[in-house]
Image (cartoon, rainbow, N blue to C red):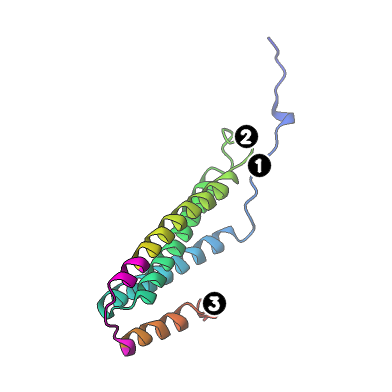
Amino acid sequence: MHAESLDRLTHSHAFLGEQHEENARRTWLVVGLTFSMMVAEITGGTLFGSLALVADGWHMSTHAAALTISAAAYHYARRHATNPRFAFGTGKFGDLAGFTSAVVLGMIALLIAYQSIERLLHPVAIAYGEAIAIASLGLVWTYPGFVER
């Protein structure tokens, strides 16, 4: 048996940025904003017959899901950053989060395609005034500078 320690050969694989806490907090803020607009668009689109709003709402759901997955990956990576079981660090969780987000996006795209074909076969009346109001709210709400305010 060897009595020599391997401690001198090991080093940290924690690659979290300096503003990691702030970035995680802001990610959760964006998740909340995105989720609330998603609910408004899907609800309004369904009530007012606007497939464009429903499709954008489902599209927003992919963003909300991707951001939630990213925030969860942030949390898990931070919590296990110094865990020696992760020999190459916890950065791989971000990659897995991205892959999962892509799968969710593909499933939502298929749902939107199905709804579009259904709408072509069975058109419905659209309440344009109400739909435009919700779309305008979404435009202002999801403007990139909104979070900065």
The disc, 1 or 2, on the residue closer to the chain's N-terminal end is 1
In this rendering, position of residue 88 left or right of residue 143: right
Q: Dot 1: within a 10 Å radius of its alpha carbon, few (fewer than 14), some, or many (20 or more) residues?
A: some
Q: In this figure, which residue is indicated by the disc labeled 2?
A: 87
Please tell me in which quadrant of the rendered image residue 1 appears. Answer: top right
Q: Position of residue 118 (x, y in %)?
A: 31, 67
Q: Nearer the viewer, mark 2 or mark 3?
A: 3
Q: Is residue 104 above or below residue 6?
A: below
Q: Amino acid at mark 3?
A: Pro
Estimate how packed mark 2 is, as few (under 14), some (14 to 19) or many (20 or more) residues with alpha carbons within 10 Å.
Answer: few
The residue closer to the viewer here, 73 or 143, is 143
Disc 1/disc 2 C-alpha distance (Å): 7 Å
Which region shows up in magenta?
116-129
Q: CA distance from mark 3 to mark 1?
A: 33 Å
The three-letter amino acid code for the residue at tag 2 is Ala
- Element under label 2? loop
Q: Secondary structure at mark 3?
A: helix
**Of label 2 and label 3, which has the lower sequence position?**
2
Q: Is residue 52 above or below residue 111?
A: below
Q: Identify the secondary structure beneath mark 1.
A: loop
The spot of residue 65 in percent (x, y) is 43, 59
Q: Which mark is residue 146?
A: none
Near mark 3 (Cα within 10 A), the count class, few <14, some 14-19 or many ≥20, is few
Which residue is at a point 55% across and 80% down the rendered structure image? Answer: 145
Which residue does the numbered mark 1 point to in the structure image?
13
- The type of residue carrying mark 1 is His
Hey, which quadrant is residue 59 in on the image? Answer: bottom left
Are circles 1 and 2 on residues that touch, CB within 8 Å? yes
**Residue in view at x 30 percent, y 78 percent:** 44
Mark 3 highlights which residue?
144
